[in-house]
Each structure stands twice: as C-alpha cells, then as structure tokens.
Amino acid sequence: MSHFTVIGLGRFGITTSLELIRLGHTVTGVDSNPKIVEKYVDHLTQSIVCDASDLSALHEIDILASDVVVVAIGSDMQASLMTVLALQDIGAKTIWVKSNTKAHQTIVSKLGVAKIIHPEEDMGIHVAQSLNYPMVEDYIAMGNGIYVVTLHISPNLAGQTLGTVLLDAFNDVHPMALKRHHEIITPLNHESVLHAHDKLLLVADHLKLKSIANAFT
C-alpha cells in the first residue's frame, strides 16, 4: 500500500483519487474549494482545504509522507506551475502533473517532474493503475477485470527465465510475447530468457496481476 496526495479535486483528480482508494491505497485530497473538499470528505483518507500554490499553506500538509503527489490543476496553468515549484521546494519525492495545453506541457517539462499526463476522466483510472503497478508501461482493459499489459523488465531480472520469475503463475498470466529492441519474440515458455529493458506482453486478470507485481519491481 502506498500513500498519494492529489492536489485539485476536479473530474480528473477525484477519478484518480477514488480509483487509488479502490486499489487499496491511502489518498489525501487537496482543493482550494471548501465545497468540493466537503463533498468527498467521506470518500478519501483525508481531505484538506488548501491553496497548494501558497508555500506556507502547503507546509501544513505532510507532503513528504506521500510516495507520489499528483498535481491535477489543469485549468489554471499558473496555479499548477506555482504548486509544482512549491512542492519541489518542500522536497516532494515524486511529482506527476496534469497538463491541458502544449504550452503547459512545455513549461512543466523544464521543471523536471516525474511524469506529465494529458487526461480526460477515463484516463484518471489509467493513471491510478499506473501508480498501483509501476512496472506496467501500458495496458488495455478488456472488461471483466481482464487486462492486456506491457511490463518493463528491469536490469535486476536480466538473465532469469520467465518460469523462474513467474513460478506457478506462468499459466495464469498468459505471457504472449517479448519485445527486444525491434525484435518480437514469440511463443514464450518457461525457459524464455529475459533481457534488461525487454517489454513483456501478457494477459492477466486484476488479481493475478497483483500477485506477480513484486516479481517485476
């Protein structure tokens, strides 16, 4: 379980927050509008009224306890940028930023944030899944809890076989292919050897994906 702070509880921010809660994480929701904060006070771990672009106000929140801070203030570019700078000044571990325009994206990219996202409401769920499973580079939801996912193979798994990494879960998660540079390797079996930075494509349901998550981190 991880702890996240989501700043800006608009459509994207609250969608991301509620999905993270559903996935078993804790979430502090922050917004400058008291009515919005009150609306979701019973749905989030903690809800705080705060102008996050105000450094002194931001100090009142335990930002350093958050594994990731998501800045979901997309409509007000100045407030978003000021919030990012304030978070960096405090020493936030990892910052993700919602960007609605190319100009916003360009400026934020210069600030060295971990990830820039360009969401609509349905992307809030996608982002939450990415936070929940950091080793998943991309996925397609097939319905009924089934996902086609692309996993990044970290250097510490190089030289190991799929059978060694997946153990008894091999047949449950259905490995389909490995992408290595420009090469596609298929079919896969227990003896297929992993290389650093391979992309592993597999099909799994939510529970099986969760059960193998630690093997790929």
Image: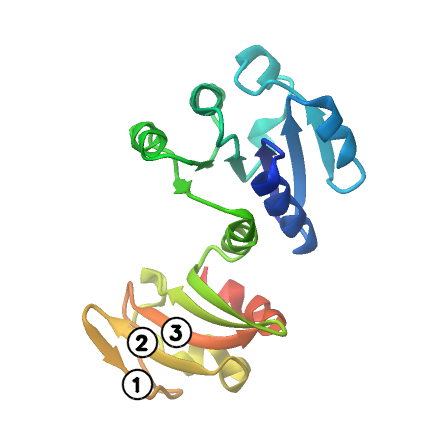
| Residue closest to the eye, 51 or 122 | 122
- Is 198 displayed left or right of 134 in the figure? left
The outermost residue toward the top is 56
Name the amino acid type tagged 3. Answer: Leu
Q: Earlier in the sequence, mark 3 or mark 2?
A: 2
Whole-Å distance between the Cαs marked 1 and 2? 7 Å
Which of the numbered marks, if any, corresponds to residue 201? 3
Check whether the beta carbons of the residues at disc 1 and disc 2 lie within 8 A of each other. Answer: yes
Q: Residue at x 31, y 76 (%)?
A: 178
The number of numbered discs placed on residues in the rendered structure image is 3
| Residue closest to the eye, 85 or 163 | 85
> Picture coordinates of residue 190 (x, y %)?
40, 87
Whole-Å distance between the Cαs marked 3 and 2? 6 Å
> Picture coordinates of residue 5 (x, y %)?
60, 35
Which of the numbered marks, if any, corresponds to residue 101? none
Check the image and report above or below for 204 versus 29.
below
Q: Earlier in the sequence, mark 1 or mark 2?
A: 2
Residue on which disc 2 sits: 178
Q: Residue at x 64, y 20 (%)?
A: 50
Name the amino acid type tagged 2. Answer: Leu
Name the amino acid type tagged 1. Answer: Thr
Check whether the beta carbons of the residues at disc 3 and disc 2 lie within 8 A of each other. Answer: yes
Residue on which disc 1 sits: 186
